[in-house]
Image (cartoon, rainbow, N blue to C red):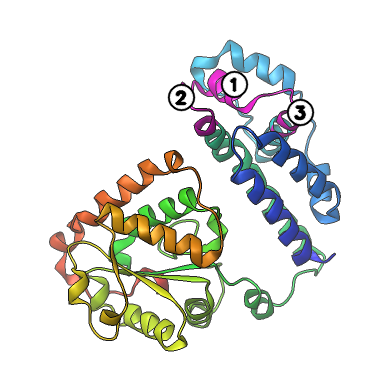
């Protein structure tokens, strides 16, 4: 297996953990560790981690609970601790919701909420760090394809077209999509939001043009600011010209009936209306062929997105000179 095949298999196993609940988190972790055992590049990464006495560390953590979890100062040891915690969870030595309660003072009584906190604070930082190290090893071994060939195999599943003036709203929308649908952050392109931007050194225009057309789901975040952006209009036009589905979402006071042609012929949704935003989430899940997560897990993110979409952008009022800036998707 080459680097890309191994990484695809690794990400699929990590995705199962990311979307697990309290009833299947242990099973998902067992699968994750079994997968790594069969991926030479990733197995080599974890074999290089320093040895950690987890029992002693947990004992120290219990003794100083009010001071927070005693993470070691160096990155290698920190990664090793997260690895050992997840490994102990997979064997049943640790229970994730008990771990969050005992060592993070998380008092939530909802088990799935505690599991999500465990995945966010322990598993995801670990899995992301391992993947970055595997990539470094692959580069050192000349196992990575040339940049253009690599990018051609990495189209995003969701493309959010927006202008940089609407970054806060875009960030809230992305958080909703990740929590509501069974997708992970790597599936989404929303470049003005940290964690969803382009890799350094890529050819911005060519990558974004391709992703706008080829992504499985295209969301046009339409506001008074974004409709003034030439580049957002170009992205919308490229998607419309491809004949592929797009989901126009109006916000910040823009009305569905005021959209310019040919967007006015597409059934737009108002992100400031709860039922409309629910419909949009349903449309995203359907377009990607994924299931939605339990509603109680993302009801709060939905409310936050509706509230953000209903408000006007304060920075536009404070600084009206930035209306013609480049959209976030092209920065």
Under circle 2, the secondary element is: loop
Picture quarter containing residue 193? bottom left
Q: Which residue is mark 3?
A: 52
| Magenta-drawn stretch contains 268 | no
Q: In screen coordinates, is 298 left or right of 111?
A: left
Judge by depth and name the residue closer to the eye, 147 or 266: 266
Which residue occupies 47% across, 77% down?
212
Which residue occupies 60% across, 45% down?
18
Which residue occupies 74% across, 45% down?
32
Q: Which residue is mark 2?
A: 108
| Magenta-drawn stretch contains 87 | yes
Judge by depth and name the residue closer to the eye, 293 or 171: 293
Picture quarter containing residue 77? top right
Crowd rating for badge 1 (residues with CA inside 10 Å; few <14, some 14–19, many 20+): some
Q: In screen coordinates, is 247 left or right of 320?
A: right
Q: Is residue 331 visible?
A: no
Secondary structure predominantly adopted by residues drawn in magenta? helix
Q: In screen coordinates, is 276 left or right of 151?
A: left
Q: Which residues are magenta?
A: 86-114
Nearer the N terminus, badge 1 or badge 3?
Answer: 3
Crowd rating for badge 3 (residues with CA inside 10 Å; few <14, some 14–19, many 20+): some
- Tell me, for residue 22, which label it has, or none: none
Q: Which residue is mark 1?
A: 98
């Amino acid at each position: 297996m080459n680097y890309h095949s191994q990484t695809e298999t690794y990400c699929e196993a990590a995705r199962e953990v990311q979307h697990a609940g309290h009833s299947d988190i242990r099973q998902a972790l067992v699968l994750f560790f079994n997968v790594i055992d069969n991926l030479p590049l990733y197995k080599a990464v974890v074999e290089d981690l320093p040895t950690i006495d987890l029992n002693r560390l947990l004992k120290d953590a219990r003794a100083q609970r009010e001071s927070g979890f005693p993470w070691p100062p160096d990155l290698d040891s920190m990664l090793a601790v997260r690895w050992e915690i997840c490994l102990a969870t997979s064997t049943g030595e640790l229970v994730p919701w008990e771990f969050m309660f005992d060592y993070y003072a998380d008092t939530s009584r909802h088990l799935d909420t505690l599991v999500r906190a465990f995945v966010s604070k322990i598993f995801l930082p670990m899995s992301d760090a391992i993947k970055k190290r595997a990539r470094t090893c692959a580069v050192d071994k000349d196992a990575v394809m040339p940049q253009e060939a690599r990018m051609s195999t990495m189209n995003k599943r969701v493309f959010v077209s927006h202008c940089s003036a609407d970054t806060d709203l875009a960030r809230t929308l992305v958080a909703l999509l990740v929590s509501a649908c069974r997708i992970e952050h790597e599936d989404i392109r929303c470049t003005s939001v940290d964690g969803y931007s382009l890799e350094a050194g890529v050819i911005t225009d060519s990558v974004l043009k391709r992703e706008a057309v080829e992504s499985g789901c295209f969301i046009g975040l339409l506001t008074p600011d974004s409709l003034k952006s030439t580049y957002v209009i170009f992205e919308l036009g490229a998607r419309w010209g491809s004949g592929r589905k797009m989901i126009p979402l109006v916000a910040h006071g823009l009305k569905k009936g005021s959209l310019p042609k040919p967007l006015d012929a597409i059934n737009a949704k108002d992100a400031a209306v709860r039922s409309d935003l629910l419909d949009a989430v349903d449309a995203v899940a359907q377009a990607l062929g994924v299931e939605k997560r339990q509603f109680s897990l993302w009801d709060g993110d939905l409310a936050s997105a509706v509230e953000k979409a209903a408000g006007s952008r304060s920075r536009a009022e404070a600084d009206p000179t930035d209306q013609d800036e480049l959209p976030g998707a092209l920065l």
